[in-house]
Image (cartoon, rainbow, N blue to C red):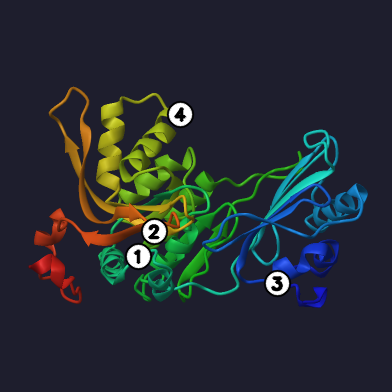
């Protein structure tokens, strides 16, 4: 493919000409450039692979990086050796140069998918099955507050996009992100994007500022792309004040996701752990865990309901009810993980919603 087919900014496309075919390859999700001639790619469901691409000289790669910085209206030099930005096509780029990286430049490009994935794609990829999709769709239709938990590169944003597609088309939705990655096909959608202050003359608008403002916009849904720090206060406040919502975070299990929310609270305020857990257990209805296994397969491994707190111990603990998950059965001779998706318990809230008009509950919850 020629560089004219690159959908990003033309000058950036020319600067990245040595890897233009990788940028245009829709199966490539990530490109890692460690110096002028060490290029690695990551494809969906595949392991990292080195490819024969690169620049002839170290200075050529540095010129390419400076072109990206100029087009993004950002500084990249010894005083500002790190650049993290979103390109105009939605792809994320991170650049590190000398003195922090001695071999010229280190550039990471996480491509923004051109094709919008749907629930059928997740089933086809083996990420989830029809029963799991039915559960997620029902939870969204009921307006439950959902946290998606997982590691880096597990597809949290993709799953969040798909959950947003289940929202009632008459609902007002506000999305809040550091860098715009959510793409809703929704008429009543207001996408908000935070702004960092890189230089003294700029004014920063944080995620927390946007969450606070979203409460004044009277939405039914507040979707925070990823909760990381102080915005947790306002997000839990929104969840506890009648708004439906979703967000994602980095954690290794559904229970760890709740602990991660706790840590964000405790970093910002001096609060008793009991009080923090009460706030979280009342705000969050469901946690969805998505994981990447050692063989690169991505699966929804756990959908658990948050059922309040258990007070048997000195410090109350979260009470979780597992609704759905993946059970690992064995490893194949090729080292692939083999298992099956399973239904577990019915949700505790089902007794209160059996007769709500317009809500069709899954048959497996009614048995």
Q: CA distance from mark 2 to mark 3?
A: 26 Å
In-front residue for pair 326/6: 326
SS label for mark 1 = loop
- Report if the CB atoms under discs 1 and 2 are less than 8 Å apart: yes
Ranked by sequence position, the earlier of labels 1 and 2 is 1
Q: CA distance from mark 1 to mark 2?
A: 6 Å
- Report if the CB atoms under discs 3 and 4 are less than 8 Å apart: no
Residue 213 locus on image (x, y percent): 49, 52
In-front residue for pair 13/192: 13
The residue at which mark 2 appears reads as 299
- Any mark on residue 24, and which? 3
The residue at which mark 1 appears reads as 128
Ranked by sequence position, the earlier of labels 1 and 4 is 1
Q: Residues within 10 Å of mark 4 (few under 14, many from 20)?
A: few
> Is 247 left, or right, of 131 in this rendering?
right
The residue at which mark 4 appears reads as 267
Ranked by sequence position, the earlier of labels 3 and 4 is 3
Quadrant of residue 68 within the rendered picture: bottom right
Ranked by sequence position, the earlier of labels 2 and 3 is 3
Residue 136 locus on image (x, y percent): 30, 64
**The furthest residue to the front:** 333
SS label for mark 3 = helix
Ranked by sequence position, the earlier of labels 4 and 2 is 4
> Is 180 left, or right, of 158 in this rendering?
right
């Amino acid at each position: 493919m020629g560089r004219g087919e690159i959908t990003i900014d033309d000058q950036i496309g020319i600067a990245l000409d040595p890897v233009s075919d990788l940028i245009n390859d829709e199966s490539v999700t990530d490109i890692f450039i460690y110096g002028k001639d060490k290029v690695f790619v990551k494809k969906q469901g595949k392991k990292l692979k080195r490819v024969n691409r690169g620049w002839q000289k170290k200075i050529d790669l540095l010129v390419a990086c400076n072109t990206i910085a100029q087009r993004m209206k950002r500084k990249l030099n010894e005083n500002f050796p790190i650049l993290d930005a979103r390109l105009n096509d939605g792809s994320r780029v991170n650049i590190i140069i000398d003195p922090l990286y001695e071999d010229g430049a280190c550039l990471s490009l996480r491509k923004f998918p051109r094709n919008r994935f749907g629930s059928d794609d997740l089933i086809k990829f083996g990420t989830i099955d029809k029963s799991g999709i039915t559960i997620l769709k029902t939870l969204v239709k009921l307006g439950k507050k959902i946290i998606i938990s997982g590691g880096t590169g597990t597809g949290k944003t993709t799953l969040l996009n798909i959950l947003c597609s289940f929202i009632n088309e008459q609902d007002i939705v506000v999305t809040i992100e550091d860098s715009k990655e959510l793409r809703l096909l929704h008429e009543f959608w207001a996408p908000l994007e935070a702004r960092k202050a890189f230089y003294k003359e700029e004014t920063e608008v944080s995620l927390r500022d946007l969450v606070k403002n979203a409460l004044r916009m009277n939405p039914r849904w507040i979707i925070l792309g990823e909760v990381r720090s102080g915005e947790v206060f306002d997000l839990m406040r929104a969840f506890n004040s009648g708004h439906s919502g979703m967000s994602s975070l980095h954690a290794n299990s559904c229970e760890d996701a709740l602990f991660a929310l706790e840590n964000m609270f405790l970093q910002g305020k001096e609060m008793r752990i009991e009080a923090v857990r009460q706030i979280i257990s009342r705000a969050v209805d469901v946690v969805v865990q998505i994981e990447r296994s050692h063989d690169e397969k991505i699966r929804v491994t756990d959908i658990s309901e948050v059922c309040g707190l258990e007070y048997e111990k000195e410090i109350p603990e979260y009470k979780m009810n597992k609704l759905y998950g993946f059970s690992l059965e064995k490893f194949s001779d090729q080292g692939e993980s083999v298992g099956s998706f399973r239904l577990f318990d019915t949700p505790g809230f089902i007794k209160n919603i059996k007769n709500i008009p317009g809500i069709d509950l899954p048959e497996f919850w009614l048995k």
